[in-house]
């Protein structure tokens, strides 16, 4: 299994992985399509040796004070950029424990550097907090995310300097 650039024909498979992995935080397919249209270089998939899609990564430049609203397609990227936003990372069961998540973090850090940005920001949901902390991310401020963003009460915003 390996990461590769996402193609438009991957989008239905990305949504299938999202539905299986993010049961409580599902986003409609248009969210993924909008991110791909706006910033394709930040979109990757995990492809198995058989050609199946086993995970995905969606990331793009953004602003710390304007994180995306859950399940709402982006209509543009908020400028001026002050961070690189890790929008979503999901790995299906076959891809877990393979080091692909840590590799995704390296990919995102490289993308941030290429954009001239100094930090990566994400919103952790569910029980993912420990994973992100192990990857070198720390809470951004108090970490709280506005309820209107739709991520749930346990969601926290994290940051890692590049």
Image (spheres, helix red, strand yellow):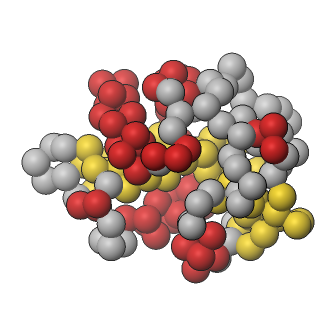
Which quadrant, please, contains the N terminus?
A: bottom left
Q: Residue 140: image x %, image y %?
A: 82, 64
Q: Nearer the viewer, residue 102 or 30?
A: 30
State whether residue 131 is above or below residue 150: below
Say whether residue 142 is left or right of residue 93: right
Q: Nearer the viewer, residue 143 or 78?
A: 143
Q: Position of residue 161 (x, y in %)?
A: 74, 68
91 on left or right of 29: left
Query: Most extreme residue toward the left, as rendered?
Result: 50
Instruction: Report the residue at 64% width, 59% height from top.
Output: 124
Name the residue rendered at 75%, 55% in the picture: 153
Q: Nearer the viewer, residue 129 or 134?
A: 129
Residue 75, quarter of the rendered image: top right
User: Residue at 46% of width from left, 46% of height from top?
Assistant: 23
Q: Residue at x 19, y 52 (%)?
A: 48
Query: Which image quadrant: the C terminus?
Result: bottom right
Residue 118 sits above or below residue 8 on the image: below
Residue 155 visible to the viewer: yes
Residue 34 left/right relative to 3: right
Query: Is any part of residue 38 visible from this angle?
Result: no
Q: In terms of depth relative to the viewer, which is nearer, 107 or 12?
A: 12
Q: Position of residue 130 (x, y in %)?
A: 59, 76
How many labels, in total?
0
The image quarter in which residue 126 lies = bottom right
What is the x, y in percent for residue 160? Answer: 71, 67
């Amino acid at each position: 299994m390996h990461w590769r650039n996402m193609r438009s024909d991957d989008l239905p498979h990305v949504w299938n992985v999202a539905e299986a992995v993010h049961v409580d935080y599902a986003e409609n397919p248009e969210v993924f399509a909008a991110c791909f249209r706006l910033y394709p270089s930040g979109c990757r998939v995990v492809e198995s040796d058989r050609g199946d899609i086993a995970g995905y990564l969606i990331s793009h430049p953004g602003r710390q004070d304007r994180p995306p609203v859950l399940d709402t397609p982006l209509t543009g990227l908020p400028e001026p950029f002050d961070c690189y936003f890790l929008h979503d990372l999901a790995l299906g069961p076959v891809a877990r424990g393979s080091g692909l998540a840590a590799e995704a973090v390296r990919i995102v850090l490289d993308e941030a550097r290429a954009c001239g940005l100094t930090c990566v920001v994400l919103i952790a949901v569910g029980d993912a907090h420990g994973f992100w902390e192990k990857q070198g991310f720390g809470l951004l401020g108090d970490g709280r995310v506005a309820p209107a963003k739709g991520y749930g009460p346990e969601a926290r915003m994290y940051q890692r300097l590049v």
